Image (cartoon, helix red, strand yellow):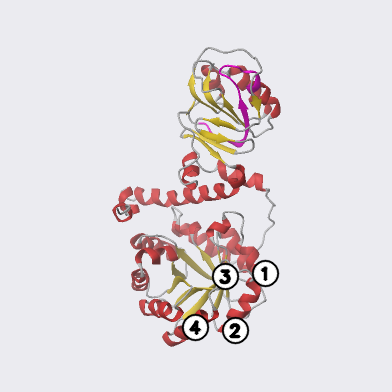
């Protein structure tokens, strides 16, 4: 079996950062360097020219995602220094044919990207007949966020075409190894290399994995378990960023400081200080849940205290969120239990039993439904709609990865505005 090719996808916006990251990836064993679509849209063909100059001994891939004017765009990339140009597999056959003719004229190769192709097996055969050089089994990032798998697509294509198959979409060292074992000749890795603080180390791990491919036993993970695992690994700010800065409650703080709660919401509506329904909700909840209590907005009287916290902890509840006040704060802090509230008050009300459990409520400015996911830490409390929980958890993890690389560049001496090229990307009026 030929040594698989490792292609690093530079899906960045800034060419200087792209070159720096590419240098580190090459030291880790990357073979081909891809000017990703975002980089080309941001910097134009100058991105390809710069990479060609910086890496004369490496293949430069221009991920143009050509959909029209195939000959013109392939010519542009070829003259700028690309050796491989990516086109969309679902482009019209005339576009594909023109791209191939232009590639032959300028001595470059064509990679057809199967992103969003409805019948990838049949289309791959057609693309091979049209003269493309590589097929890319690619599941786009937005599709990955809702569970799409490039490995599943690759396995469908194995043995269906005779030209080399590339694979792209959310790959890490483990899945890259599986991809080679499943028949991929070219492994394309983006975020799990370029967003790492240690790019060289990340690239080296992928390089080692694809050079000795194997498929180990993989435990099936339920969607519920995957959501919890991902959300426990990210912060409340990561989650709001993934939701386009939405979902955060207002005027609420962590009573116990640096604690965290992740779980599904059991909602409670009560009148100020009536602690009957909040306490009854402990019996309704299951381990891993978060109680979210609307206390009628009252901060002068508390529906929750130490004894309720003990009871909730024994039940396996992982956090309490109150649109209102909490009391017995010193005892709760000793427990270190995640309680989030708008304030503290020593007064307790009476257990009158008014209100409802597991109904839609408004809590600190956010609508919360039973089963919505809650992520709460010292920065605040965020509500994730239950139907988007897996997607948002995946997107929040991508936000965290991006920040890891930016943090590393700041550690090396750059300012945040320099890393992000802030002036360049300020909105023009």
Please name which of the two marks, 1 or 3, marks the residue nearer to the observer.
Answer: 3
Q: Mark 2 points at which residue?
A: 129
- Label whose residue precedes the other's in the sequence (4 or 2): 4
Cβ atoms under marks 4 and 2 closer than 8 Å: no
Work out how far the residue at label 1 is from the one at label 2, CA to CA, in angstroms: 18 Å
Is 401 on the left-hand or right-hand side of 153?
left
Work out how far the residue at label 2 is from the one at label 3, CA to CA, in angstroms: 15 Å
Q: In this view, does 328 lie above or below 321?
A: above
Q: What x and y, as percent, mark residue 428? A: 30, 54
- Label whose residue precedes the other's in the sequence (1 or 2): 2
Q: Is residue 362 above or below residue 41?
A: above
**Quarter of the N terminus within the rendering:** bottom right
Q: Residue at x 34, y 70 (%)?
A: 54
- Tell which of 340 and 185 is nearer to you: 340
Q: Label 3: how many residues lie within 10 Å, few (<14), some (14-19) or many (20+)?
A: many
- Label whose residue precedes the other's in the sequence (1 or 3): 3
Secondary structure beneath dot 1 equals helix
Q: What x and y, as percent, mark residue 159? A: 67, 76
Q: Label 1: how many residues lie within 10 Å, few (<14), some (14-19) or many (20+)?
A: some
Please name which of the two marks, 1 or 2, marks the residue nearer to the observer.
Answer: 2
Secondary structure beneath dot 2 equals helix
Q: Mark 1 points at which residue?
A: 156
Q: Name the residue under label 4.
A: 100
Q: Is 274 contained in the magenta span?
A: yes
Work out how far the residue at label 4 is from the one at label 3, CA to CA, in angstroms: 16 Å
- Label whose residue precedes the other's in the sequence (4 or 3): 4
Work out how far the residue at label 4 is from the one at label 1, CA to CA, in angstroms: 25 Å
Cβ atoms under marks 4 and 1 closer than 8 Å: no
Q: Is residue 213 visible?
A: no
Secondary structure beneath dot 3 equals loop
Disc number at residue 114? 3
What range is drawn magenta here? 259-278
């Amino acid at each position: 079996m030929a040594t698989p090719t490792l292609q690093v996808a530079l899906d960045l916006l800034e060419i200087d950062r792209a070159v720096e990251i590419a240098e580190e990836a090459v030291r880790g064993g990357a073979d081909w360097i891809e000017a990703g679509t975002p980089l080309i849209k941001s910097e134009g063909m100058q991105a390809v020219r710069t990479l060609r100059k910086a890496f004369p001994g490496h293949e430069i891939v221009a991920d143009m995602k050509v959909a029209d004017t195939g000959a013109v765009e392939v010519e542009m990339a070829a003259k700028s220094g690309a050796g491989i140009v990516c086109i969309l597999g679902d482009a019209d056959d005339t576009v594909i044919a023109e791209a191939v003719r232009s590639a032959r004229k300028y001595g470059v190769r064509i990679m057809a990207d199967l992103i969003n192709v409805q019948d990838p097996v049949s289309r791959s055969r057609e693309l091979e007949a049209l003269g493309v050089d590589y097929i890319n089994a690619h599941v786009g990032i937005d599709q990955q966020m809702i569970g799409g798998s490039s490995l599943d697509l690759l396995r469908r294509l194995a043995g269906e075409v005779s030209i080399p198959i590339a694979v792209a979409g959310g790959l890490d060292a483990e899945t890259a190894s599986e991809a080679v074992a499943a028949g991929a000749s070219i492994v394309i890795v983006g975020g799990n290399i370029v967003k790492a603080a240690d790019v060289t180390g990340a690239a080296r791990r992928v390089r080692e994995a694809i050079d000795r491919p194997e498929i180990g036993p993989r435990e099936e993970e339920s969607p519920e378990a995957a959501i919890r695992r991902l959300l426990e690994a990210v912060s409340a700010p990561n989650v709001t960023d993934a939701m386009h800065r939405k979902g955060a409650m207002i005027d609420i703080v962590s009573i116990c400081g640096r604690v965290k709660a992740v779980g599904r919401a059991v909602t409670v509506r009560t009148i100020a200080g009536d602690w009957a329904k909040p306490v009854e909700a402990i019996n309704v909840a299951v381990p891993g849940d978060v109680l979210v209590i609307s206390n009628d907005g009252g901060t002068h009287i508390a529906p929750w205290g130490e004894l309720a916290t003990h009871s909730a902890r024994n039940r396996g509840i992982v956090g309490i969120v109150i649109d209102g006040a909490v009391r017995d704060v010193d005892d709760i802090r000793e427990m270190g239990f995640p309680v989030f509230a708008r304030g503290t008050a020593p007064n307790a009300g009476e257990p009158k039993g008014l209100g409802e459990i597991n109904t839609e409520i408004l809590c600190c400015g956010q609508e919360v439904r039973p089963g919505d996911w809650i992520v709460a830490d010292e920065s605040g409390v965020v509500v994730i709609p239950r139907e988007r929980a897996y997607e948002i958890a995946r997107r929040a993890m991508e936000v965290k990865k991006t920040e890891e690389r930016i943090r590393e560049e700041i550690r090396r001496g750059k300012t945040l505005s320099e890393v992000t090229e802030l002036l360049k990307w300020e909105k023009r009026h």
